[in-house]
Amino acid sequence: MSETTTFSGNRGLQIEEKLIFEMGNEGCSGVDLPEPGPVDLDRMGGLAKRGSSGLPDLSEPQVVRHYTRLSQKNYGIDTGFYPLGSCTMKHNPRLSEKVARLPGLADLHPLQPQKTVQGALEVMDSLAHWLKELTGMPAVAMSPAAGAHGEWCGLMAIRTAHEEKGEGHRRRVLVPESAHGTNPASAAMCGFTVDPIPAKENGRVDLDALKAKLGPDVAGLMLTNPNTCGLFESEIIEIAAAIHGAGGYFYCDGANFNAIVGRVKIADLGIDCMHINLHKTFATPHGGGGPGAGPTVLSAALAPFAPVPYVVHGKGGFELVEDAREGAKPFGRVKGFHGQFGVFVRALAYIASMGADGLRQASSDAVLNANYLQARLGDMLTPSFDGPCMHEALFDDRFLKDTGVTTLDFAKALIDEGYHPMTMYFPLVVHGALLMEPTETESKEAIDQFIDVVRSLALRAKAGAADEFKASPRFTPRRRLDETLAARTPVLRWKA
Amino acid sequence: MRYLPLTDSDRRAMLAAIGATDVDELFRDVPAAARLAEALPLPRHQGEMEVERAFTRMAGKNLSAGCAPFFIGAGIYRHHVPAAVDQLLLRGEFLTAYTPYQPEVSQGTLQALFEFQTQVAMITGMDVANASMYDGATAAAEAAVMACRVTKRARVILSGSLHPHYAETTETSLRYTEMTAERLPPDPLGFEDLLGRVDSRTACVVVQNPGFFGGVRDLRLLAATCHEAGALLVVMVAEPTSLGLFESPGAMGADIVVCEGQSLGVGMNFGGPGLGLFATRDKYVRQMPGRLVGQTVDVDGKRGWVLTLSTREQHIRREKATSNICTNSGLCALAFSMHLTMLGGSGLARLAELNHAMAVKLEQKLAAVKGLKVLAQSYYNEFAVHLGDGADAALLVDKLADQGILAGVPASRFYPTWPELAPVLILAATETNTEDDMDRLVAGLKEALS
């Protein structure tokens, strides 16, 4: 046995774990249920299941150990610093988890009579109120399930507004080249075509190029602000005027709203609609990929087309409106029931904890932390743009030129140092992008440590340690994985 | 403020390092006219005690399911979630992890999702499943769009058995596309003729089993008819615990199976978040929406998992992607998978038998209510009843709520413009009900209808 291997394959706290399908004893269960008695076949329509599903049988201790071991192969915000630009991985308060589990909020059915769920409707209404106040917008569609879903919701409202005005021929949507991939994908789902607009040297939208693209077939503009390069679009008011002047609407991708909450009301920028990723801005957990929530604020021009359902103040309390009412022309329904209620509870608990003063402080600290990172790394890495950034700092890979180390190698080496990598190769407009977002929930000490690590890695890369970078990560449960193999011969499930 | 670690002296030191005098200077790219000089006039920050008190007050204004005889279903089902599931979900490495794009630090999430995909494929009787969609409604809409993509046809038939929210969400999704949806009227008796509607222009038929009104049906002939016409059969399962007892849609010939997965692991949460399950045949895998986890090896030859086939997805394909979906329902998928692992194959079968037995018992007890008629001959854990001509199910539910009984869903909540559905009530029974609950419901119904 060599120094680095063991008989079991385990390495101390890193324990190899089989798939559940490779364990278990038939007849075991982790759940004790009462005896159901004989099945009443008369009520089965001749459709009783034949054969077994193949699911494995495990007891509770086996299940608990299985998932505990799996969790230990994961990195989370609770583990360490997560400088993942554009994704905003900030601390998730545990109070939010606690209140979301109160039976009076968790054990509620969406179809209970409304008089039995007034508290739940109050949660929805309170959150809607905060979102409207923080953005200065008059209306909000609460039901979109995630950011991309909110984009689609906003664009559906825009399309419907044009149709109502007899301008259904407006089918072209302008989208900057640096946009998230969801933007063009959402536009396509509304029957729009996507027309890219270029950026200027300073990383902002080229206003002249945008104006040149305007015309009677333009439905609107989708712009992320602060943009995906981490910069505020300084000419945004002129941009809004130009798109409105051409008869289009202005969709803002609110993925980076967390940088400006309490410092700017987006209504003052001329925006017609914007989704808000509750997990990015209001600290609900990412959960390894959802659930999210993407409430979408709407201007007075788009508000009549908001999807059902929504909460209003009625005579006897809160009312949930599930069908079109007088004056409203909802474009439809975007999902089942009333929105991501469990996520609403968590976001509202965070907002109530932070208050107006705390939310403004959070944006300020997020921007301060990112600028500090940019300032302290600026001489060693290569910042893509001059001047202050917002909540994230963007670097390109010029500092790695001739080292043989790529952005990917650099990121994988960070893993061995105990960090989740930064966002890589996004936005696409910057070569070999490294996008770093510290968020406001990191201490100066944590950021200083990260800076020291990044500087030491940059020095090592420049000193010719490319082989070490190529071999990283070395200390993770699995090292670099063969993604080509996975795609060429897909194995998407276990089979006996 | 307890979530913000910086102190004022940190802030001063950091500003000095940046070369700025104050933080406002960092916001100088914001047009001056739009800058807010101070915090908005809204409530200020609060401690945990104050926030918890406010939420406890709001929670107290609701009648939670555990405090009432509870018979509501219609797309969200109340089941007992084993204690271990929630305890495990709260592990920070699951709760606070990002999407597993960096596989070396995400093998936990990836392996769990690979197991989830396998479990979903097994219970639906399909080859392959994705790593989840937002909920059942959006999964149904995505299935319709995918069927159009596969068949290169544009006509979607939505059965009257489909939950109205699923049908509406699908209609919304198709509204500004080349695709069209033909939505059939509500079908409480299971009489609709789907076979006669399938033709050479049909991309798919979307049918729900058990149906919105509770009835179960044999889908084999419908599958064969669809396939003969070159169309796909999309089967929606709103209550996946039923798959422990009933023949799977895959075994009956479905091409795409979508489910609302909420009934395992997730809880009700006033209807959201849900969990969309999405499964299909191997041959259609590259047409699927959503994330997929695949098996591979690392540089040392050890088995591991990665997100794969991402050339279908928006971050690569942009406007040509199979869907715009990015974030899905990851933690709910994990909860579903944990609950199903706790149950195992034999536990799922027993849970399903128990649910069916509870519904049968409820039907038996309802025989004591004069004028009430159960509409479905065969069902799982839910069925619609007709309360008698002239009866108003919405009024009755309202009256019983005043007595602390949550007595099902009036069909009129979904179909307010269908007077013939006014007397129809949809009742669900699960393992969480007791005989005493049923007796209280029956007594309440008798009194209200007399």
Image (spheres, grey):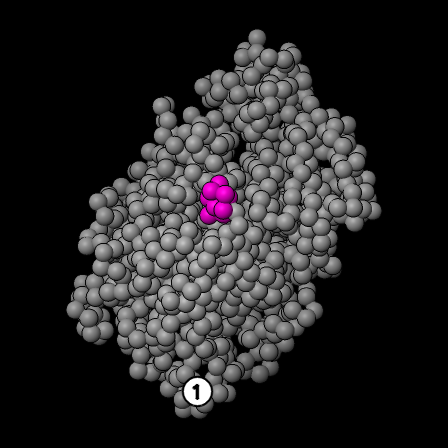
Q: Residue at x 45, y 88 (%)?
A: A403
What residue span does the magenta drawing correspond to?
A158-167
In the rendered structure, does residue A162 fall within the stretch colored magenta?
Answer: yes
Q: Residue at x 45, y 90 (%)?
A: A402
Amino acid under disc 1: Lys
**B250 relative to A162 in the view: left or right:** right
Q: Residue at x 27, y 68 (%)?
A: A444
**A165 relative to B283 in the view: left or right:** left
Q: Mark 1 falls on what kind of element?
A: loop
**B307 relative to A229 in the view: left or right:** right
Quarter holding the N terminus of chain B?
bottom left
* Subunit under mark 1: A
Residue B8 visible from this viewpoint: yes
Q: Which residue is mark 1?
A: A401
Q: Position of residue A103 (x, y in %)?
A: 43, 36
**B184 relative to A274 in the view: left or right:** right
Taking the view exactly as shown, the residue that stands out farthest to the front is A216
Principal secondary structure, stretch drawn in magenta: helix
Q: Quadrant of residue A429?
A: bottom left
In the rendered image of this protein, does residue A98 appear above or below residue A313?
A: below
